Image (tube, rainbow, N blue to C red):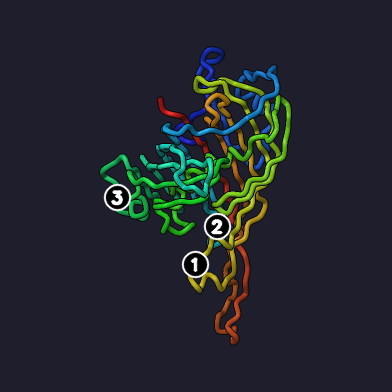
Amino acid sequence: MIAAISWSFIPRETNTQQPHENEGFRPMSPQPVDWDVIQKQTWGNVDIDRPSKKFRAEFVSGGTYTQKSALEIKQVFPLNGKEHSSLSYMDVENTMFVSDSSNVVVGGGKQFNITLNHVAMTQKSMGIEVKYDSEKSDNESNLLSDEFGDLVGQTATINTDGNYQIIRTSSDTGSQETEESSASSVTPSSQFELVSRMIKALPVESAKPGDEWDIQINLESFEEIDGHAQLLGYIQYDGADCALIIINGTVAFDMSALVEGVDAAASELGIMQMKDGKMSSVMYWDHQENLARFTEINLSFTLQNPYDASTDFSDSKDGSIDLSFIDVPTFEYMQIYLERNE
């Protein structure tokens, strides 16, 4: 199980329990989120006596929103007959200014000017630790400082349709980074998708506590989610009355798109594969501001990395390779917080 993120937006009900009793949500992937888990972690303060309600998403033109996200990734891989692990932690903060889209093709869409305010990342693997924090002036020169050093403070523009799905991105910060680089995680489009994916999880029809519905989410980040959602009830979070929605399902990635641009030697080995993708999520939907105030997402999957298992390259007269795969179990834990500034 992955360790908890160093900071948390988890709600705290200090009027009913002492703060130290709230251990927060913990990564549960690949175990699904269920009612018993929610009851334990919210101390049973979920209001299920509510009428049916229609949910919608809304970003107010002229409004400014702050988005904070934390991502933790753990991978386990074999090397020289031993099992090793790698850990990555990332904190990101963005500001989004919303206006009506000037793109006549959009029709009812919005324009988001997204500014990257802060990024911090730590990577640990095989006894080596690399750090970067944009708020610090004494960052060591390393791969992370090279990737993130010029990104903070930059603004990019995203246009969406009336359902807040991205249709065009201009000046995408770090857009020239490969999908495998760390900087690709902080591009405005990737950060905005953390918000838009939860909009797609809302029920199409009105829903009351206990109602369930199927979801299918296709994201520009080559990710596809198929699952099941349920409105458990309502709970106070960050001063807002929020609908508590849980999501469980499977997740898949288009690995061919992720490896576009890899070198020829790697492409000869074939495409990385993925199996056993599972997802669980808890969302606090602010039905007055019409946004996902807080979301927690757990993902687990196994990457199958191709490699040449030939023992003696000289034995292969025709240049063929003995293709095999190494399984790399991967776990991701994410927290996303969003609010409209006063």
Q: Quadrant of the N terminus?
A: top right
Q: Quadrant of residue 213?
A: top right
Three-letter residue code for mark 2: Lys
| Front-most of residues 144 and 233 | 233
- Residue annotated with mark 2: 82
* Residue wearing tag 3: 140
SS at mark 2 in the image? strand
- Between label 2 and label 3, give the one nearer the viewer: 3
Q: Is residue 51 left or right of residue 75?
A: right
The answer to whether one can see residue 68 in this image is: yes
Q: Earlier in the sequence, mark 1 or mark 2?
A: 2
> Viewer-nearest of labels 1 and 2?
1
Q: CA distance from mark 1 to mark 2?
A: 27 Å
Viewer-proximal residue, 305 or 246? Answer: 246
Image point (54%, 71%), residue name: 267
Say if 333 sits above or below 13 in the image: below
Which residue lies under the disc numbered 1? 262
Of marks 2 and 3, which one's residue comes earlier in the chain?
2
Residue 81: x and y, percent?
56, 61
Residue 293 horizontal/vertical position (percent): 52, 30
Neighbor class of circle 2 (other Cα within 10 Å; few <14, some 14-19, many 20+) is few
Task: Inspect the image, locate mark 3, and give the three-letter code of the amino acid beneath it.
Answer: Glu
SS type, badge 1: loop
Q: Residue at x 51, y 15 (%)?
A: 14
Q: Are marks 3 and 1 in contact (CB under 8 Å)?
A: no
Res. 56 image quadrant: top right
Residue 108 in percent (x, y) is at 53, 40
The answer to which image quadrant residue 30 occupies is: top right
* Pointer 2 with pointer 3, Cβ within 8 A: no
Mark 1: which amino acid?
Val
Nearest to the eye among marks 3 and 1: give it.
1
Residue that sits furthest to the top in the current view: 15
